[in-house]
Image: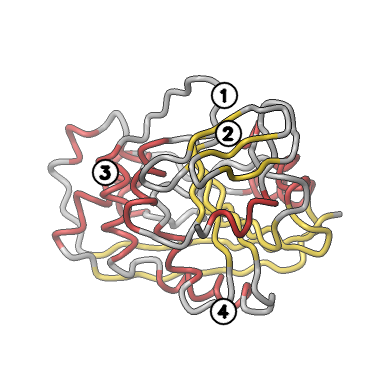
Amino acid sequence: MYMQRFESIFQCPVCTSPMKIIELKSVVCDQHHTFDIAKQGYVNFLTRPVHSEYDKALFEARKTVIDSGLYERLHSMIREIIDEEKAPKVLDTGCGEGSHLSHILRDVSGAVGVGIDIAKEGILSAAKYYDDFIWCVGDLANSPFSKESFDIILNILSPANYAEFTRLVKQDGLLIKVVPKSGYLKEIRDIFYTEAYSNEQTVERFKENFRNMETYQLSYKVPLHENLIQPLLQMTPLTWNKIDGANEVHITEITIDLEILVGRKK
């Protein structure tokens, strides 16, 4: 079993003891706290019920959009950064249905891909579509991973937990955080919002917590096929609670405007 080869990355989210995979059925710690491996191949490490606004339809829409190639330039850029590491262990935090991680690690020799998300529906989808990855339902505030387990941590358009990132990344490892800039999906933003967006606070917080080595800017427009409009509207929080108006949206192109922050521990 693929997961068993890397059981050393796990730490009990209840008592922080080391964990082992038993009979390919459960992940069990020294104190006998047990988390079953689902038949789909993922593990749910949540220690309490968690409500998520992200449902199955959203993750299916997200997969459709990401598989269309809309983010391929982002994936390629991150792949080049990761390629400098030999056989890296890569954790995608807030991985959703796993599409970003799968595309990024394509052709990265020897990479081990691990994804965690608090939304069970996202991990169910990831386990369905992507084999030879380790998928975990879990909360970064109480994560199931041991100290300094990862060479690379990805945080793509997702909230950050810098204390946990610092604990989980190796001393010489990298944190790669992707944040939207003011032009990101502006064709949608302009329809539903009047105020401008700024990522200044997000970037400053990154630099407060990690030594910022490099910053990359990525901005481009792509034609948007009509079949992608509804999936794109469905996957982005920009349209949440505004779905009535979303049915009338007609967009012919979309802007991807991102900042990629690369840092190491201070």
Which marked residue is nearer to the observer: mark 3 or mark 2? 2
Q: Are marks 3 and 2 in contact (CB under 8 Å)?
A: no
Q: Which mark is residue 109?
A: 4
Q: Position of residue 219 (x, y in %)?
A: 47, 69
Q: Is residue 232 left or right of residue 169?
A: left
Q: Earlier in the sequence, mark 4 or mark 1?
A: 1
Between residues 102 and 236, which one lies in front from this camera angle?
102
Q: Earlier in the sequence, mark 1 or mark 3?
A: 1
Q: Are marks 4 and 3 in contact (CB under 8 Å)?
A: no
Q: Spatial distance from mark 4 to mark 1, Cα to Cα? A: 34 Å
At 49% from the left and 35% from the top, the residue drawn is 36
Q: Earlier in the sequence, mark 2 or mark 1?
A: 1
Q: Position of residue 179 (x, y in %)?
A: 55, 53
Q: Spatial distance from mark 2 to mark 4, Cα to Cα? A: 29 Å
- Tell me if residue 246 comes above or below residue 223 in the rendering: above
Read off the residue under disc 3: 234
Q: Which mark is residue 139?
A: 2
Give the residue type that dot 1 points to.
Thr
- Tell me if residue 81 comes above or below residue 114 in the rendering: below
Q: Which mark is residue 47?
A: 1
Give the residue type that dot 2 points to.
Asp
Which marked residue is nearer to the observer: mark 4 or mark 3? 4
Q: Spatial distance from mark 3 to mark 2, Cα to Cα? A: 24 Å
Between residues 44 and 70, which one lies in front from this camera angle?
44
Q: Spatial distance from mark 2 to mark 1, Cα to Cα? A: 9 Å
Q: Secondary structure at mark 3?
A: helix
Which marked residue is nearer to the observer: mark 2 or mark 1? 1
Q: Are marks 4 and 1 in contact (CB under 8 Å)?
A: no
